[in-house]
Amino acid sequence: MESFGGSEIVGRERELARIAGVLDAVDSRVGVRAQVLVLTAEPGAGKSTLVDWAAARAAGRGFQVLRARAGEGEEGFGFAGLHQLLRPLLGEADRLSAPQREALLVAFGQQAAAGDRQPDPLLIRYAVLSLLSDAATGRRLLLLVDDAQWLDQGSVEVLAFLARRLDGEAIGVLLAAREEGLPGQFDREFAVLAVTPLDRAAAGLLLDRQPQPPRGRARLRIFEQASGNPLALTELARAVAREPGGAKGADAAESLPLTARLERIFAADLAGLPQRTRQVLLLAAAAGPAQFSEVLRATPDAGDPQVWLPAERAGLVRLESGQARLRHPLVRSAVYQAASFEERRAAHQALAEALVDDPDRHAWHLAAATLGPDEEVAGALAAGAERARRRGGYAAAAATLERAAALTPDANLRARRLLEAATMAMLGGCPQWVGELAVRVCAIAEDPELLAEASMRAGWSLAVTTRHEESLGFLVPVAQSMVERAPQLALGALGTAATPAYNAGSLFYRAELRRIAELVPEQPDEVDRIWLRAGTEPFTDREWALPELRRCVAEAPEDSLAHLAELGAAAWILDETQLAVRLLGQAMDHLHRAPTAGGNAVVAQALALALFDSGAWSAARSTAQEAYRVAVEVGSDNAAVGSPILQGTLLALHGDASGARELIGTAVAGVDLSCSPSLFVRSCHALALAALAEGDHLAAYRQLRAVFSRDFHPAPVHYHASYYYLGDLAAAAVRAGHEDDARAVLEVAVRSLGWLRSARLEVVVNRACALLSGLDQAEQHFRAALADPAGDLWPFERALVRLEFGEWLRRHRRVTEARTELSAALGIFERLDARPWTERAASELRAAGVPTTRTETAGRTADLTPQQLEIARAAAAGLTNREIGAKLLLSPRTVGFHLHKIFPKLGITTRTQLHDALGDAQRAG
């Protein structure tokens, strides 16, 4: 039990210890995982009390505490929460570089943007990081954000960006939110501590510390109804004290949800307050938190402390530092809901009149005071949305446009404003919101092209999730309906639809998309058609698609993000892996400079897969991690599942089987993989590799066999991805004693693939045939798998062939030849740090009479985190700490901190040794 503010915090020992641990972590700079803590709780659970305790404890230890408390209704004000948090440091903004300072001040509305230029969101985020990093050089910082469920989207994104980059910084972050409203950016990456209900013992202690502790039946009622909620316990105890017969009140509230019961209690307190007190309370509730100055401007009564004293005695407000603050958000809700509409309207009108010099808030309060459609108010909101857009506050612009649409009398204009809101939400990287807005447009719009655009938005929002068929349900009709009216739009819809069609693997939709595409005449821009044909029929259309792909790559403008992404995806599917890495890498460079990171997850995921195939595993891992971070932020479910599967694959290949299974299990939990066969077969392959890493060949075979059906003629579960696991299936089958079953799968697969196979598939198929063939054909297939030099572009798959051919040769007493193949395989496995396969190849070489010693470079670089590896590569290339920081969005001091940790891991002492220490890891990057 902890004393705080003259009272005791009961039953929160676990939470207090974790918060203290954040402060300790800042002192020791142990990294993001320990320096960031997210508290979630139901209303009234005491998270605000814990935040207050953290502030007092940090201040007592010499920290500078920066605080922000979001308010309901502020979601539409771009960067409002961030501005509140950083206000004490804005006097230091002059120390920032000119571009950073301008971006930050424009975002805060304190400086006009130059022309129509919008501040770069990445520049805003880097400005915040630099400002805080500089402040932390002199004094440790603790950032406290309460009621984060009401933070505006722009502030959420910047805080998440910052929280991921605290390595080496003397900064801690404590964020508290209602459990149902935690921003998606914080619910998976950071440590989340649920503030659970108090147990009966702690609840009893809390009741006993009330001025008039309840007893008997009333006490039992409170236990039952409060359900361990501290605020409910104290407020119900207060209610029973007001009405000693309290059973009646308890009975009356019994059927209501907990928050409604609490709001009812707060409303009962209001009834006994003077009229002037109720009026200023309502103004404070309507203005929201941290807006006491607005209340003062709206009524002179707010400046009289005597007006607030009855509310303070009732426990509704706190008077401190010359301001009156509502004690809890539920107080605000209760005050606001207890008022009639006319009373609320009058409060908002008074606030609007007081804020005529702040057009954005003026418009918001006018809107809150408006009962029905009002074009004048809607127009003012739309103008505010345009101002938010110019500042780079896309989410704020979307929220404002959504409210403007609700007040727009004309149905067509209302639909257009909703569509504009969807566009802003898309630029803000919020696909789920985009989908909701698009559906509303479709419900009211009559214009065919407006409906088509809305359906395109809806399809886009679903295309990045695992709801593939729903996405196609929007996109296919758009394509069909626009074939004659707007053929380029139809082709665009088909290109967008190719992605969910690939992930769903549906033969029907693939055929339907191709049927519609044949109706679309040739267009000036044919990139969507290339992606469509490559994505839906990667094997049968390969001969047509490859020359078209190369032609478009040569002709496409280098600054076209859409072209780079689609052509890169087509190249990956057609096994033009090096080209895919180049194109998708260029697309990622564009996205890093774009005003939104909304598309990063999909492109980053595709790039990670191409990097993995090419053998650049360290780069693949860091790119997959980036894809996951962005996917979680924007709701891109497909990448949020697919990226951990790829990371799990890499863990398995490095020998961490249990880590791989844990990561994959967490990623697919609650996901219906039968609707996403592309994810399903990749997860099977990853789990099979984990089993192989542990030598469990039967378990590996079962996982790999699941990527083909159990029919008489086994079919691939996914029409493209399944075939690439034929070699691993055959290898596991041989060791598990299931050769006949695997042969049946292979025979059908070879017939289905035909003979126009890529160099990569030639390696895979010939490897499988060699393992499952008799003595007279095995060597022929092994040599066919190694014949084309292009096969070296997929080093791990090629090394597996060399390993198994070497084993075959050694078993047939051809030891000299075996040594050549085994040595080549060992070199690749060591470079990739595929530890189980390295050990197997080394063991075979020793059996062939060749002593082996494991090289150390791969082992040393494996100890580096992905971010440390990126920093090491950049430093090895000659970049300064400041240049590295600008490239990776880190402060120069954080770069120096990482290098301080990197040197001992690599066994070096100076930067000049980095290039040699990294070895192949430098070239792989």
Image (cartoon, grey):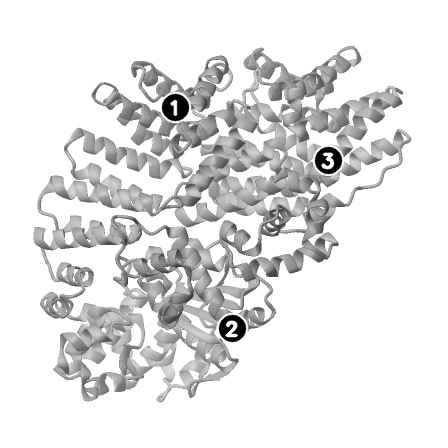
The residue pinned by badge 2 equals 140
Secondary element at image label 2: loop
Is 345 positioned to the left or the right of 617 in the image? left
Q: CA distance from mark 1 to mark 3?
A: 37 Å
Position of residue 137 measured from the top left corner of the image (x, y, whole percent): 52, 70
* Tag of residue 826: none
The residue pinned by badge 3 equals 829
- Give the image quarter of residue 827: top right
Sooner in the amino-acid sequence: mark 2 or mark 3: 2
Q: CA distance from mark 1 to mark 2?
A: 52 Å
The residue pinned by badge 1 equals 527
Query: Hey, what amino acid is under mark 2?
Result: Arg
Position of residue 177 measured from the top left corner of the image (x, y, whole percent): 39, 64
Is 566 positioned to the left or the right of 901 in the image? left
Look at the image and tell me in which quarter the C terminus lies.
top right
Position of residue 261 measured from the top left corner of the image (x, y, whole percent): 28, 70
Sooner in the amino-acid sequence: mark 1 or mark 2: 2
Position of residue 599 measured from the top left corner of the image (x, y, whole percent): 40, 40
Is 648 positioned to the left or the right of 49 in the image? right
